[in-house]
Structure formats: structure tokens, C-alpha cells
Image: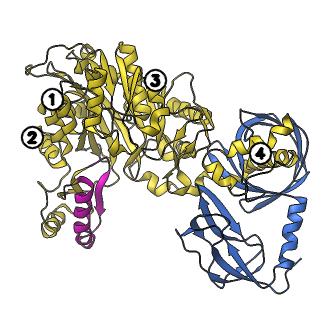
Amino acid sequence: MKYQVRTQDREWLVEIEGESPVYVLHIDGRRILADVSKLGDPSLLSILLDNVSYLAHAVAANDNPGAFEVSIGGKLAQVRVLDELAALAQQMQPAQTQGRVVVQSPMPGLVVDVCVEPGDVVQRGSRLVVVEAMKMQNELTSEVAGTVREVTAQLNQAVESGATLLVIEADAAPKA
Amino acid sequence: MARSSPAKKRQPTRHIRKMLVANRGEIAVRVCKALRELGIRSVAVYSDVDRNALHVSRADEAYGLDGNTSLDTYLRIDKILAVAARSGADAIHPGYGFLSENAAFAAACRDAGVVFVGPSPGAIARMGDKLQAREAARAAGVPLVPGSPGAVPDVDTALGVASELGYPVMLKAAAGGGGKGMRRLESAEELRGAFARTAEEARRAFANPELYLEKFIVDPRHIEIQVFGDQHGHYAALGERECTLQRRHQKVIEEAPSPLVTPELRAKMCATATSLAAAVGYLGAGTVEFVTDQAGNFYFLEMNTRLQVEHPVTELTTGLDLVHEQVRVAAGEQLSFLERLPLEPQGWAIECRIYAEDPRRDFLPCRGRILKLSIPYGPGVRNDFGIYEGYDVPVYYDPLLGKLAVWGPDRPHAIARMQRALHDLVIEGIRTNTAFHAWALDQPEFRQGNLDTGFIGRAFKPALLDPDPAELERFVTAAVIRAYELDRAPKLPRDHSSSRWALAGRGVGALDDRHAEGSLEA
């Protein structure tokens, strides 16, 4: 299986195959062997990555397919993992969403960061707003390239699911 | 460092058979351990939500306090004394926080004929009021930070005093403590703007609007001396604890001894603290806190009339059990270590406070279920925790999960051992400050012992806890493995009304994973 992975503004192409407990991964062309054992819970992974040992807690987000929160040694990262189909679907999306794009909160929560202002030019994948729900931060990124027209989200504002956060005017001729 | 005064009216030795522990969390567990060692039956009290807390199962008996908030439970003198009567406890250990420095509680215990493990109500009241404590310290010849002689009644008086002291100054609530109710002010304008607000805050928080002024010590260190007094007129100091590493006036990492303190300075600080304990006829465990400048001048800050959170570092470097000593004193016995005085610290100890809080989000407290817990053991590692795997950390109380403490023959060994212990500490399902500690121990300033109380505020940025680019591959790999496993698991119908983020936040996210996967592995 091939995945497109994004975290901390970096992107990887990762191929994975094999059966539990041993997986073979190709990360940016390098072949790595991962021996994985579950410590009492499927989200708790003891990983031997080419025999280098570490413990990871990887929790998947329900309503945000492909979003994982991974913690290792007390450090945290939000990791987005899209399979080829999902990555393709995301690339196709802008073509269907020209004009006004209303960005809504996917969940009830607290706006903890507003990253854009009206007039800002955004790309597909640009960070827009961070909404926190039950201590989990959910980064909302732009599905389109365009210009921010309105920002209704306010810092520390409690929002309901479906609340309008901002409006983007998509570029008339999105890049494929 | 021991000092004897003519024996005052002394209580006869009293046999304590059963002791109520009026606290929760790690300190209640800690006290229960000591009581078991001493052959004293322990009585726990618990709020509704704490029925599953560790201290309840570690005690010999436990009684519910009916309610959840601190005000309804662990702070209710009437409820706790009712449990003491019902259980037949002859003594009460208050731990720290809650009722431990409440003079009315100590008096109510005395009136109910129950031994309060701590000093007299009079000593608690006197040391709990900052102005009275300063006065007691002055009378005992303890150096004070230059400041107003007493309360400053109004802003004009305050401005006059401040211009004599020189800015910056600290404006403090007379009834404050524990880092609360104080403000650093850089100029007359700031003082003018803050005076009424601070008085109002003090009135609301401590029911006492009185304020006083102190000169602000630049780049201060916070060093405290553990003292003990018994009913036979013995007063002793057990050496210092270095508590300079603080975040917003809250201690984070403590050590014993202090890298700043020479044997001469230790002897001087211990003698000063002992004379203050003697002057107020102090009974049991207490701590005299000093603010120290970089030249080693020390000034009285406050006295805490209870066991401190950070007492393990003193235990590790003296070999004493301070809870045992507290119980001895309460029973009317002599301190056990009088013949060993003066106590010189053996080796080096460090303690890290492990909190359920998110250092990336301004250290906001977190709640949730502990999915995985692995607490480090091994040579030189001590842990004091109040949690277990599967435990739900409640929202109602202090987010301290426990403490890691280490001992080493010297400071570099102790630091290396703490780094090992932090590496071995696994707490999943809830956010903690573990990575923050690892960062702090790694700083050159910490390693050189070159600290002041402002260090964390200046040096720490949340982004420092993000994975290094070199580490990112591990995060990517873990996420890809999880995604691959979930993609290959047969899809089960899911309740789409509840988000998996939310479930994870409530600690049941992993359960969801297990369902999705169950049939794959079956």
C-alpha cells in the first residue's frame, strides 16, 4: 500500500507491505523493516525499526480520515496519512469547488488559532484555523487555492459543529 | 544544628493505633505506606469520583465524603472529623494542601481529642499570615528582604516605601502564599495601576486585602531548609532543598543539596532556620523558605507548616523517613536522629513533578484515562505516584500525578539517572509534562547549576517539545503502520455521531480501534 504522509510541513511517500508483526516500509526510497508488537492496546506500538526500539501511541481521528496523533517519549506530532485514492480525491476537489468555499468547523470545540486574515492568499493545504475539542487539536487546512474573503472565527471562541469559520474565494483556474 | 529549649508543657507519649489521612493522590498513598511500616492502621477518605483512586485501596479502611469538589469533601472539617470519630482514629495526617495549613482544622482536631500531625494551631496561624511570619522572623534574627515594616494601607504609602526600596518591587498579599497573590512591579506607574487590583484580588482569594511591599531580588534563587521540632524542646535542620526551577512561582524540579550552597552557607542557613523554629515553639515538620541572591545572601520568604511535596529529596540524601518522624513527634517521642546532627547530605537527589498538563498549550491541566503506565524502577530511582493503568484522572483536583525522584553519588550522576528514569516513564492516554522535564534537564544552565527563578519563563518555548526533524521518521512510521492496519481491518458499522477525537479525549479512543480490528485478528 502506498501512502502520502504529511507532518510539520513535510511530506513523505511511504510504501508499506507485509503481515503483522513484520512490515516492510519504503520511506523516500529507503527500505526499512518494522517489527511491531502491541502492548495491551492496538494503539500502543512497540516498534523495532531496523532493530531500533521505541514505543509509540498512535490514535486515529474518527471524523477526520487519515489524521493521527502520535506520541513518542512525551513528544507529539499530528500526522496525516492518505492512501493513493484519498490523495487523488483531495487533488481533484478544487476543480469541483470553484467560487466561494465556506470553511466550517467539523466538530464542536474551541478556536485556538486563527492563521489567516481577510485578503490572505492561501494554497491547498494552507493552515487556516485550529479547533480544539477534548484537548485534541484539529488543524483545518484549505482544500482550495484562493483568497480569504471573510474570517468569522475568533480566537478562544467556542464553536458548534458546522459553524462557519471563514470564507475563501477559490482561484478561477485552479492548478491541477 | 540541633537546639534544645527548656521542655515546655509536654504531652505524655501517646500510642497511636489508627490514623486518618485527610488527603488524596500521591501524598495520601505516601502516608499510607509509612503507616503500614509503622504498624498503624490507615484510614482514607474519598470523594465520590475518588472511590477508584489509589489511596483508597492502599489504606486499611476508607470512608466516603459524599461530594466531589474540594470544598465539599477534602476541605470539610466537619466531615473529616466525623470520619475520625466513626473510624476511631486517634490521629489525623493532613498531607500537604487542603487542610494542612488550616489553623481552625488543627484546633478542631485538638478539641475533638484527635492528634493533629503538625504544629499547634497558634504556630500555623502565625506562620500562615505573612506579616506575622515576617515579624516572628525579624524577632528571631532571621534576615528579611528589605520591605515595608508592615501592611501598606494605601497606594500613596506604597509609592513612598517603593521609592525608598528602589524598583523593581514585589507587592504581596499578607494572606497569600504558594506563589499566589503577588506581583512584580517595575515602576511607580505600574505600582499605581496595580495596587487597588491586587488588594481586590487578595480580598477575593484570601478574604484579606492587606498588602505589603518587598524589594525584588534580581535573578533570585529559591532555597529552603527542612526543619523539625519535637515536644521535648529539640529543634533541628535537615539541610536545604534547591527549588529555583519554577514556572510562574510553582516549583517544577527540586534537588538536594543545592549547587549554590557551600558547607559554610548550609551551616548558616540551617542555624537560622532552627532558631526560627525554636522561637515559635515549632512542632513536627516545617520548611523555612529563603530567597537567595547570586552572591549567597539569603532572606526569609515564608514558612510552610507541613510536609512539602518535595520532601523525598531530603529523605534520599539523609536516609530519614520524614513521615515516620512526623508520627514520632505527634506521639510525643523524640526525633530519631538527634545523635546524627549536624546532618550532612549524602550524594545528590533530584525530583521531577509529573503533572497531567500540556506544556504545548500553556500547561493547561488535562484529564482523561491512563491507557498505558510504566513507572521506572531500578537502582537509585524512587517513585511516588497516585495513579495506575486504567485510572481516570479527574478534573476536580490538582493535576499532580506523582513524582519521580532519583539519587546519585553526585549531581552529574543524579542528572543522568533522572534522564534515564524519564525515558523509562510511559504515561499514554493523557498529556503530561514528561518531555518538558527532559528538555529542562538537558539545558546547559541546568547542568551547570546556574539557575534563577525566571529561567523557564525566558528559555522555554512550546516548539522545543516538537519532534526533531531526525525523529520525525519514527512518528511517520507509527502513523503509517496504524493506518495500514486499520485500512486492512474489515470495516464495522460505526456510530458516526461521536467523533473519534472526542472518544480519544475521553480515553475510549483505543477501544474504538480494538473494535475495528477485532475481527481481523479473530
Q: Which chain letter goes with mark 1? A: B
- Image coordinates of residue A45 in percent, x first then y, are 74, 38
The amino acid type of the residue labelled 3 equals Arg
Q: Earlier in the sequence, mark 4 or mark 1?
A: 1
Magenta region: B177-206
Q: Nearer the viewer, mark 4 or mark 3?
A: 3
* Dots 2 and 1 on the same chain: yes
* Dots 4 and 2 on the same chain: yes
- Give the SS element for disc 4: helix
Front residue of B422 and B21 = B21
Mark 1, other Cα within 10 Å: few <14 / some 14–19 / many ≥20: few
Q: Earlier in the sequence, mark 4 or mark 3?
A: 3
Q: Nearer the viewer, mark 3 or mark 2?
A: 3
- Indicate which disc residue B139 carries: 2
Residue B516 in sight from this viewpoint: yes
* Dots 4 and 3 on the same chain: yes
The reply to whether callout 2 and callout 1 are in contact (CB within 8 Å) is no
| Placement of A88 over or under B282, stated as above or below | below
Left or right of B243? Residue A138 is right
Give the spatial CA distance, label 3 vs label 1: 29 Å
Give yes or no for residue A34 being in the magenta stretch: no
- Image coordinates of residue A49 in percent, x first then y, are 80, 38
The amino acid type of the residue labelled 4 equals Ala
- Image coordinates of residue A52 in percent, x first then y, are 77, 36
Q: Main SS type for the magenta part?
A: helix
- Apparent colour of chain B: yellow
Give yes or no for residue B201 being in the magenta stretch: yes
Q: Earlier in the sequence, mark 2 or mark 1?
A: 1
Q: Name the residue carrying label 1.
A: B111
Q: Quadrant of residue B360?
A: bottom right
